[in-house]
Image (cartoon, helix red, strand yellow):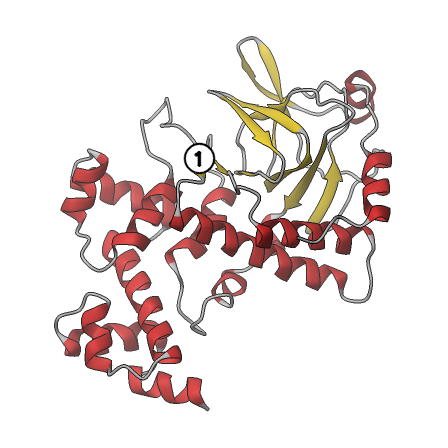
Amino acid sequence: MQPMDAEVLRILRKNNKSQDWGKINKKLHPKIVKYVDGKPVYQFFDTLNDNSFEKNGQLISIRTQPVNSFVPYHVHNYVEMMVVLSGRCVIKTQSESITLIQDEIMIIGCKTIHKIKPINDETIVVEIALKRTAFSLRDLTFLTHSRDAQSVSSTVFFLLSNDDSYGAFNVFHTQHDVNVVNKVNNIIREYYRPDNYSNQVIKFKILELFIRLVRLASKGPILQTQKEDHKNNEVDALTLLLYIEKNYKTVTLKSMAKHFKFHPNYLSSILKRKTGYTFIKLVHLQRINVAAEYLSLTDISIESISLAVGYEDPSCFYKIFRNHMGCSPREYRQRQAA
């Protein structure tokens, strides 16, 4: 595990000094959008530089959480990643409190009401703001083994950045995973000690971090999602997508609905509304993505790959693969080998 650069740690300690909410409120006049239990919820749509009221126009920006400081309930129009570098912190959403310890990460969706309780002098928390235009869908699919296929998990960032993602968040209890910790350290180091092309470097490091988090979540119980929405009783979208990723070979709408105790039609409507895709489209995306990996990394016959990913009829597999990839499985394998 790579230790955090001493100079960067010094910068973080310098930047997390206590701040007076009264002065901030008087200076910036943030809009009150609603009230929760009689307390105002403010609209924080601008990202700011550390220890100043200057707006930060970068698509990806990092800021340290001030110590011993009151922060009111607020919402953003961008995705926020809260990362605990040392100590612990408590983040309150509208419905629950989440405790994060060192190396744990919380991804907070657009328009999700939240606040962080005051942290002590020994705690370092960084906030990574990811504006909607920071990544494109192609950026996410670039990280899959296939060139053009979309993995189901690649849609998660866009679920979180959707304006309708009321109450959406994901907490990753990383268990101090060395790859995740090193990636976080590298991102912060690159941001505070910039060089040529640092913005591009940070962008792709965050994408890799995101994929590593999803990989961890798919392997074990390290993921905590929002609890069922008290307004519409819907399960978190990432939970649904990870279920499809794990069970893509045999999953049916009926079996998945039974697992989550939903009516099939209700589950279908949730998936369509939250992802923009139908259930069968999501299953095909995952199957074709896995098939593309087999084609790229193995010499297994195409017919065997078809069966391995859940298609009993090879002709059906050929047709669906071409629809998604724009070429046949054989042509795709040849391109990958070139």
Horizontal side of residue 23 vs 221, given as left or right: right
Q: Is residue 96 visible?
A: yes
Q: Which residue is farthest front?
A: 1
Viewer-closest of 172 and 199: 172
Residue drawn at 32 percent across, 61 percent down: 286
Q: Residue furthest top?
A: 38
Question: For mark 1, what is the residue?
Answer: 224
Q: Secondary structure at mark 1?
A: strand
Direction from residue 284 to residue 60 in the image, left or right: right
Residue pictured at 80% horizontal, 23% vertical? 24
> Looking at the image, which is closer to me, 125 or 254?
125
Q: Find residue 204 and report its horizontal and vertical position in percent.
A: 62, 61
Q: Give how far across and how far down residue 11 sits, in percent.
A: 85, 42
In the image, what residue occupies the spot 30% across and 82% down? Answer: 329
Is 74 positioned to the left or the right of 193 in the image?
Answer: left
- Between residues 49 and 33, which one lies in front from this camera angle? 49
Local packing at callout 1 (Cα closer than 10 Å; few below 14, some 14-19, many 20+) is: some
In this view, 58 is above or below 297:
above
Q: How many marks can you see?
A: 1
Image quadrant assignment for residue 45: top right
Q: Amino acid at mark 1?
A: Gln
Q: Give the image location of residue 92, x and y in percent.
A: 56, 22
Residue 258 % position (x, y): 16, 39
Left or right position of 103 against 109: right
17 relative to 77, above or below:
above
